[in-house]
Amino acid sequence: MSSSPRAFRLIISCPDKPGIVAAVSNFIAQQQGNIIEANHYSDLANDWFFMRHVIAADSLPATLDQFQQAFRPIAEQFDMRWEIRDASKKRRVLLMVSKQDHCLSDLLYRWKSGEMDFDIPCVISNHEDLRDYVEWHGIPYVCIPVPRGEKGKQQAFAKTDEVIAKHRPDTIVLARYMQIIPPWMCERYPNQIINIHHSFLPSFAGAKPYHQAKERGVKLTGATSHYVTKDLDAGPIIEQDVIRISHHDSIAETIRLGKDVEKSVLARALRYHLEDRVLVHGNKTIVFS
Amino acid sequence: MSSSPRAFRLIISCPDKPGIVAAVSNFIAQQQGNIIEANHYSDLANDWFFMRHVIAADSLPATLDQFQQAFRPIAEQFDMRWEIRDASKKRRVLLMVSKQDHCLSDLLYRWKSGEMDFDIPCVISNHEDLRDYVEWHGIPYVCIPVPRGEKGKQQAFAKTDEVIAKHRPDTIVLARYMQIIPPWMCERYPNQIINIHHSFLPSFAGAKPYHQAKERGVKLTGATSHYVTKDLDAGPIIEQDVIRISHHDSIAETIRLGKDVEKSVLARALRYHLEDRVLVHGNKTIVFS
Amino acid sequence: MSSSPRAFRLIISCPDKPGIVAAVSNFIAQQQGNIIEANHYSDLANDWFFMRHVIAADSLPATLDQFQQAFRPIAEQFDMRWEIRDASKKRRVLLMVSKQDHCLSDLLYRWKSGEMDFDIPCVISNHEDLRDYVEWHGIPYVCIPVPRGEKGKQQAFAKTDEVIAKHRPDTIVLARYMQIIPPWMCERYPNQIINIHHSFLPSFAGAKPYHQAKERGVKLTGATSHYVTKDLDAGPIIEQDVIRISHHDSIAETIRLGKDVEKSVLARALRYHLEDRVLVHGNKTIVFS
Amino acid sequence: MSSSPRAFRLIISCPDKPGIVAAVSNFIAQQQGNIIEANHYSDLANDWFFMRHVIAADSLPATLDQFQQAFRPIAEQFDMRWEIRDASKKRRVLLMVSKQDHCLSDLLYRWKSGEMDFDIPCVISNHEDLRDYVEWHGIPYVCIPVPRGEKGKQQAFAKTDEVIAKHRPDTIVLARYMQIIPPWMCERYPNQIINIHHSFLPSFAGAKPYHQAKERGVKLTGATSHYVTKDLDAGPIIEQDVIRISHHDSIAETIRLGKDVEKSVLARALRYHLEDRVLVHGNKTIVFS
């Protein structure tokens, strides 16, 4: 919905009970809001309710602030976790990469062509390799090498966190960053760090998933995009996909085929995230795609 | 949602304007209805609005009739085309077949195993071939041969319509019936006759689509399920899918591969239809899947 | 390839070295054999060579026996593991089931309609539920209950093995049999027992894979057909596939969607196996599909 | 097979008769050639035979020329249309674009990253828009505007042909060029011009296929890569794929989703072409993928 009119997005999750939809719909109608898109989901197993509205901003006499103030009593009545966002306010997405550039390149194309709408405050890498390419796009490139030892790693991530703090991103994308993010950093940015793992998780977590996949002889290879938590490759899954491979595909071929899946899975996951379509509950996601 | 509790389904389409969602949600809340599932869609290009609610019947003090009565003023206010259906009331689905039995067999399995919930008043065929198989399921089998000449055809379809009228189906499924339904019959049952065509329409309409596909050298073969209108293979599409084929697949192989797609596409289309997920507008469908 | 003329299939695997293809092609040409289909694969990583030929039987003056005799010197020269099979000789496939009948029903349809070409000496089940349905097809049904205790299980599998021995199947298909085959039985029928597991292995091996999948929040659910070895759900994979699921699919919906994948994956795996397209090497398969 | 050793590719098509495989295999063995990859296909309906071999160049004492000379008698004996190519000799691929850059960008990434192995002598466009981007890659950019009138068009294509002649490409890729190539030019480069059409052909040939698709209400949108002939969008199909769309996808969304399919279909088609995997016969292709 790239070319949609200015809009607010109202995202809600709360314990399920009768009357939520009516209360929210009434409120929007009273505010004279035009609903462009609406999704609900009742998780019957956990008695939890999820809702996403896109409301035409031009139809609302109220400002975002006024709208928020007016909504607060309803939110309190139903114990809602909620958020109202101005869809026209671009999110700041900080990218982290290593040497592999297929996901980076794919995201930069979608960003540059306007297919996806976000700002990139900077790209952080543990290598210098992609500096020229990134800077050609007019994006700052910060190289922070990550040495092998524990102490060097600590210093590298302390420095990384400084750079992140300075650029105030809303979202951090690990576009094949290949380093394990320390637990304290995972906890500092909950549901804000998006990773792409090159397997169909939970199969083949950890290192060299394509080699693991060939070793096991699977007939499909996949990719998984998920929020990063302190448990490696075990955070809430946003999006996954697979592609068929065959005995005659070498490791090199498998990697090549897999790259295309990684690119599209990460791009879809980031798009869902930026459009506020992903609601996290426990270790799972509701994706209103 | 096969094992769902007793439910009503409220299906609405009307000109789009502000306040519809609020009015409907309020109404449901006033009736103390618990919403199990809700879908909206605003067709911005045509200013038309579509909505489907599933409401837990046990949460409603009102009967279906009372609920309908109470809803009528809202429906009139917004010029709605609408319907409330008791989800527990099984639809009557009359099947029509020729000699090919893969779709029939697939549907009978889903029916027999309870995977799909409907009644089959009878199976009509223009051949005797499948009588034993159908009757083993305890389903009446009516054979009405369709001769080649125009007059014979007219008599056959007059007879067919008599049998249909007698069995009062809600839905007629052409599970590879292979005869062209006369226009008057198409018009008598609008959006009630579901066909499966063995190509990815609009490619390869008409006779022998697999042969047409091989002739053109396409790399995927498909199937399309659509409502039957008097324009051959041109009615509103409900569901489609494809499967990869290769130069080394003969016509026989292509037919074999295609059958599996036909089966799953028809089964999905019929499921959507029976669950009131398909809203027809013009020559297109909105499918709340 | 269903309606192909009478044919021999020559299946070869051996250490890779120059001259194999020439030697085999020459031999076939000297025997005046018409090659209908040919596949080679050189596993460069393991220096192993795999080959499958389909030869028109009518083009050969020799009988199968004479052809085998004549081929033996070449096989010895290249240290081949090899086999020549008469494609017109139907394989005997014994089916084992529990209570779930979706895979059974799918295979019986493909068998009955002639889509797949094999004999079914009998169906073994640990329950009585499917007796009527199987016997209607004219297939013997043997019920061998499997009790919970270790001793009861031993007796049940001893009995099962007796029944198998009596019916001399070439292939045993566990069409959702739901019992763990004891190691001694796995070893007695190497690469002859085909299982369908209702997950995308290696994810979610063992019990209740659909529940495991929902618990982890994956976005696709799958099925895997593999040869049974004494390591549970870890034998050589023949075929896999997946289907997209969503947060709004309950466990019941996930199971329903998964069943269609199980059916098609098992049917494809069995077809590959029956057409001698599957060559096992170590714990992996080469599938000339 | 990007990282494969130096290799020759022997591509053959000829009337089918016994002895071809033996003659060719013998020849390769006599030349001491190591076969890395081999594919055959007998088109039984048309009595035509197709074959592709990849032979390790280092295993051959002969040069490419000597190998060709030696092979000639066999080729004549069997009336072969044939070709031997040095796989290490990069093909020259001239790209033609209009304003849309998604396919261009995708191909340039695969070229720049070494994922696909070819040279780009120049990019021709009828607009200036993409000059900077192309030249940043170090590739010459030639802008030849194509005016609306017949005479202007003739001049533009005469000029285009001059530029092509000067750069001597082996292959011309219309990466969303959006102009109809005149018949004389189609005939000058038979099976050398590859187009990407943004529909699942033969559906929605001609202009604005995404609009046509939305209008018809199809549930999948696709892309087709084919060799250009003088019949618009009707040349031999190399590769196709589809993606699911829904009623809620606007034209803009459909276009966005389709772009990803266009990119991957064109990239696969070009890869097959460059690896000599595509054999054209009549208006169809055999693709040894």
Image (cartoon, coloured by chain):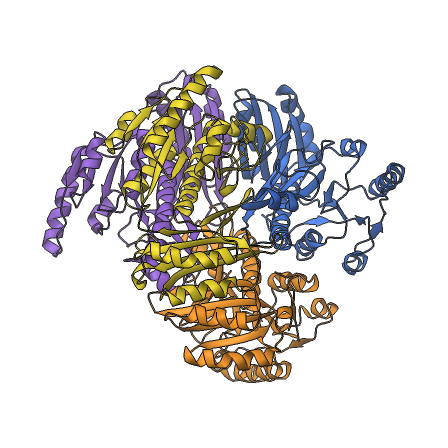
Chain colours: A orange, B yellow, C purple, D blue
Q: How many marks?
A: 0
Q: Foreground: B194 or C262?
A: B194
Q: Foreground: A131 or A50?
A: A50
- Name the spot of residue C134 as percent of width and height, x first: 21, 35
Q: Is residue C123 left or right of residue C248?
A: left
The residue depicted at 30 percent of the width and 30 percent of the height is C112
Residue B167 shows in this picture: yes
Residue D170 in the image: above or below residue D3: above
Q: Foreground: C57 or C118?
A: C118
Task: Assign the N terminus of chain A to one quadrant of the image.
Answer: bottom right
Q: Give the image quarter of residue B270.
A: top left
Q: Is residue B216 left or right of residue B82?
A: right
Residue C15 shows in this picture: no
- Name the spot of residue D9 as percent of width and height, x first: 63, 37
Q: Give the image quarter of residue B195.
A: top left
The residue depicted at 52 percent of the width and 76 percent of the height is A83
- Name the spot of residue B142 as percent of width and height, x first: 32, 25
The residue depicted at 14 percent of the width and 44 percent of the height is C144
Residue C261 in the image: above or below residue A282: above
- Name the spot of residue B21 as percent of width and height, x first: 50, 63
